[in-house]
Image: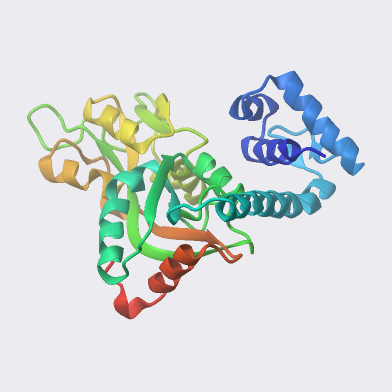
Amino acid sequence: MDAAWLEDFLALIDCGHFSRAAEQRGITQPAFSRRVRALEAWIGSPLFDRDLQPIALTPAGERFRPVAEETLRRLYQGREAAREAGRMAVATLRFASTQALSLTFFPNWLRAVERWAPLEATIHLTAAHMTACEQMMLRGEAQFLLCHHHPQATHLLMSEQFRSVPLGADALLPVSAPEPGGTRPLYALPGSAEAPLPLLAFSGESGMGRILTGARAIEASGSWLKPAFTSHLASVLVAMAREARGVAWAPMSLVAQDLERGSLVRAASADGDVPIEIRLYRPRARQSPPAERLWAAILRPSEQDIP
């Protein structure tokens, strides 16, 4: 049994389509399909119901999923432990972060942490979309994940294998460029059936996109929208909104300065904002001494000074 088969299995669950999963894994679809069938042959039971679109797990697949996640996580953690034992290296704290929070929250949070808990470690940060961050955590390539959270949006770290702690609050809100020379939104929700508004949308890899879908925020706004542009990066969607290309949902942490300057304005009232948390995730299994010291410090609320 090849460990890559387990990675293929989890990628297919995440993407829901063979073609998208194969692209994410960097192989052709026929080769990807052969590897999935090889895993099913090794297990002795189909893992996916291919008659559904997007495909769904069979009961056997549901039973095997936590085993695959735990096996991969332990395998990569074991590899990392062996590498660290085999070399003398400076302690490193490895963070994964969604792109928006890596720009807006992480630097100030890290500075605050270091004021009350000197880390004495090298900090390594990888910023990516939520799907890539999840895979890094499952493979043991990161010790911590900084991301947004909403109770109606699911992700692969919402299991007994991981723990999390809230670090702050944020909100998703629709924004638009202002009318020329004015302060009213160029694209004001809800639009109309006759003139739907251009939507700058999150792609499926984005954690923000999952939150909007889970919270049914766009449906709740009653808006008439037509997709005009798609990206997994909130910063790109915000840049397109500044250029008057459409309306975008974005975290307040990312657009607060734009709203103050007037380069962006709210496209709807604050009543439709989606409250979200900023959370830090870690594996439940014990990690390196520097990582455990950081986690213990975070859990001491009397010492926290988080922005």
Relative to the observer, which residue lies in front, 85 or 128? 85
Q: Is residue 193 above or below residue 149?
A: above
Q: Residue at x 42, y 47 (%)?
A: 97
In this rendering, the answer to whether 177 lies above or below 294 is: above
Which of the pair 57/226 is nearer the observer? Answer: 57
Is residue 50 visible to us here? no
Residue 181 visible (yes or no):
yes
Between 165 and 246, the residue placed more toward the observer is 165
* Of 63 and 125, the residue lying toward us: 125
Horizontal arrangement in the rendering, residue 259 relative to residue 162 (left or right): left
Q: Residue furthest left?
A: 181
Q: How many marks?
A: 0
State the colouring used for the structure image. Answer: rainbow
Instruction: Say whether residue 19 is left or right of residue 172.
Output: right
Corner quadrant of residue 23: top right
Q: Residue at x 27, y 30 (%)?
A: 239
Residue at 37% over, 30% down: 200
Which image quarter: residue 22?
Answer: top right
Q: Position of residue 65 (x, y in %)?
A: 74, 50
Would you place residue 194 above or below residue 53 in this image? above
Across and down, in percent, residue 68 comes to: 73, 49
Quadrant containing the C terminus is bottom left
- The residue that appears at 38% across and 38% down in the rendered structure is 223
Task: Work out which quarter of the rendered image holds the N terminus and state it.
Answer: top right
- Image quadrant where residue 293 sits: bottom left
Which residue of the protein is positioned furthest toward the right in this rendering? 44
Could you tell me residue 106's position as x and y percent? 32, 52
Rendered location of residue 244, percent (x, y): 23, 26
